[in-house]
Amino acid sequence: MSSRNKIILQNVAPAILANACVFLFSVVDGIFVGQGAGMQALGAVNIALPFVLIVQALNAMASIGGVTITAIRFGSGDKEGAQNAFMHAVTINFLVGCLVVLIGCGLTAPVCQLLGATGNYFELAKDYVFWWALFAVANSVSLNLQSFCRNDGDPGLVAITNVVVTVLNIFLDWLFVFPLQKGVAGAAVATGISQVVGLLVILTHFVFKKGELRIKKYKPQVKLYCKIVLRGLPEAIAQFSTPVTTFCMNRTLMANYGEIGINAFSVISYLSSFTMSVFFGASEGMQPLFGQAYGAKQGEDLKYYYRAGQIISVVGSAICVAIYIIFPHALCGLFGADAETIDFTAIHMWEYCWGFIIGSINTMISAYFYSTKRSGQAIALNIVRSLVMNSIVITFVPMILGKAVVWHTFGIYEIFVLIVAMTLKKFSEKNGITYSAD
């Protein structure tokens, strides 16, 4: 194995595992809630899912923004500057967690109303949002430290952290949902406790000074806070794609299919969140390599890493899609769906999931842009993808072509986004890659 491929494996494999574990929390919650509390409870958690995913997007903004700046500074030999960026990013994530606690626990009912929860779904969604938000600080800081730990030369500890957290989450989901009969609230508490344990594990890297980065006092700089937010904004916008898509799909499916559409999509969205973890993990794993190669002005390495990242994303997402198409009934059965919902979901599974392959390419291009100081292109791409194209296509295309096309809208808008992405890449590199100091 070449040195480049070894470096890629050391960074990407733990990143994919870490992201898969994070998204697996939601999948495991869905399985236990569906089996232990029924399909309405599962639908309620799916309605609450955009809130969770928006928070994760805000966490990604500070984490990825800070890691991007840190990687470039490490690449150029500026260790003190990398340390400073790290502490600023940790602070932002801590404040995000505090804000989520205040909103999720203090304004639970309005949040659920904004999410579209009504009738039988409303009280169940309130329970999930409240208890999930209560642990938001631990969640935010843990995810931040994992990103930096990976960038600080210890991706193995990140993998260990997520394995421990995932196993604990599975056990606690079983405990709270079945023996203790706590339903959706129990699933949220299980996830929260698991994140607290994960925070304690990942802290060992910084407490025992295993790398270059330290948790210590620093002098706050408004300019650096703004720079971190700007660099992380493309990834935050990219991750808004999932909650916006989920929100629009829930409304469109309710209008066209009623409750069976919502219940079917709740199963598909859990599976899709796991698939997205593959290409978000691949992009996050490649991001430090992009940044370090850019900071060191190593053009050939940068091109190699870009090609490798695209291959990993496409192959990984294609494998997931193949599994969903081959075993739809077995996967749907994991969530406790009735026979009618299983059959309905299995019919439409492939119609939605083929879009993941296109989406994986777009995600890697976005990471490539923001890691090489092309934040403008990355922001433009992700606004088109996450806020504009998905909402327009999902909302209006079925009105024009009929409800049968609803399930294809995910793939359709990703194709339009790919055209935009390749156009931006071509024009930004028409005179080669421009290097500049951080």
Image (cartoon, rainbow, N blue to C red):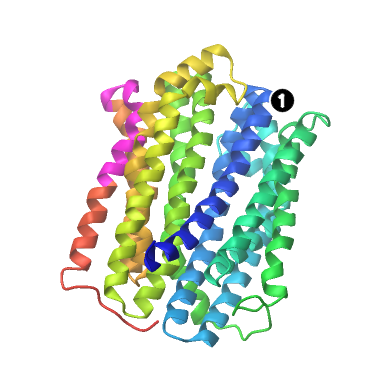
Task: Give the residues drawn in magenta, as a range.
Answer: 400-416
Which amino acid, by three-letter code, is at mark 1? Answer: Gly
Question: Which corner quadrant of the image does residue 168 belong to?
Answer: top right
Labels in figure, total: 1
- Picture layout, residue 15 above or below residue 84: above
**In magenta segment, residue 402:** yes
Where's residue 342, x and y in %? 52, 18
| Identity of the residue drawn at 53% across and 56% down | 14
- Residue located beneath label 1 in the image: 36
Residue 159 position, x and y percent, is: 60, 56
The residue at the far right in this view is 180
Residue under the point 26% across and 24% down: 401
Q: To which quarter of the image does residue 332 belong? A: top right
- Classed neighbour count for the residue bearing mark 1: other residues with Cα under 10 Å, few (<14), some (14–19), many (≥20): many
**Quadrant into which the C terminus falls:** bottom left
| Magenta-drawn stretch contains 329 | no
Left or right: 60 as drawn, with respect to 383: right
Compared to 246, does 398 lie above or below?
above
Q: Nearer the viewer, residue 85 or 214?
A: 214
Apparent side of residue 213 relative to residue 12 in the rendered image (left or right): right
